[in-house]
Image (cartoon, helix red, strand yellow):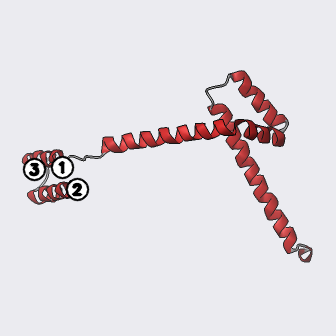
Amino acid sequence: MLADYTFMSFFWDVLLLMAWIIWFWLLITVFMDIFRRHDTSGFSKVLWVIFVIVLPYIGVLIYLLVEHKGMAERNMKQAQAQQQQFDTYVRSVAQTDPTEQISKAQQLLSSGAITQEEFDQIKAKALASA
C-alpha cells in the first residue's frame, strides 16, 4: 500500500492542500472586504454573500474581478489609519524634550525618590538623545 504512494501522488496532495488553503484565504478576504465596506448598502452586501455562498468559486472570482480596485483602496486606507494611530501613540508616549526630562528628574531628586547617581544617569541619557 505504501509502495503505491509515489512522489507524484505526494506532489499532487501537497498541491491540492495549498490550493485549498489559498481558497479559504481568498474566501475570508472577500468576506472581510464585503463587511468592511461603507460605500454599499446592506442589501448589496447580502447579495454578494449569497452569491459567494451559492456559487463559491465563481462568486469569489467575480468579486475579485469587479472590486479589485476598491479592495486595494480600502486596504491602503486601513493601513494608513493604523500607521497614523501608531505614530500618534508613539508621539504621546515618547519624551523628546531633554529639558522636560531633566526637570522631571530634578523634581524626583528633590523629593528623594531617586538618588544623585540616578539623576546623573537620567540627565546624561536626556542630553545624549538631544
State the residue lying farthest toward the front: 69
Q: Amino acid at mark 1?
A: Pro
The 10 Å Cα crowd at callout 3, few under 14, some 14 to 19, many 20 or more, is: some
Q: State the residue position of label 2.
A: 129
Q: Position of residue 37 (x, y in %)?
A: 63, 30
Viewed as shown, does residue 8 lie left or right of 25?
right
Q: State the residue position of label 1.
A: 98
The 10 Å Cα crowd at callout 1, few under 14, some 14 to 19, many 20 or more, is: some
Give the spatial CA distance, label 1 vs label 2.
Answer: 8 Å
Viewed as shown, does residue 128 lie left or right of 54?
left
Q: Amino acid at mark 2?
A: Ser
Which disc is residue 109 wearing? 3
Residues marked 2 and 3 touching at CB (< 8 Å): no
Residues marked 1 and 2 touching at CB (< 8 Å): yes
Q: Residue at x 83, y 69 (%)?
A: 10
Give the spatial CA distance, label 2 vs label 3.
Answer: 21 Å
Q: Position of residue 22 (x, y in %)?
A: 73, 52
Name the quadrant containing residue 57: top right
Q: Residue at x 68, y 42 (%)?
A: 29
Q: Nearer the viewer, mark 2 or mark 3?
A: 2
Residues marked 1 and 3 touching at CB (< 8 Å): no
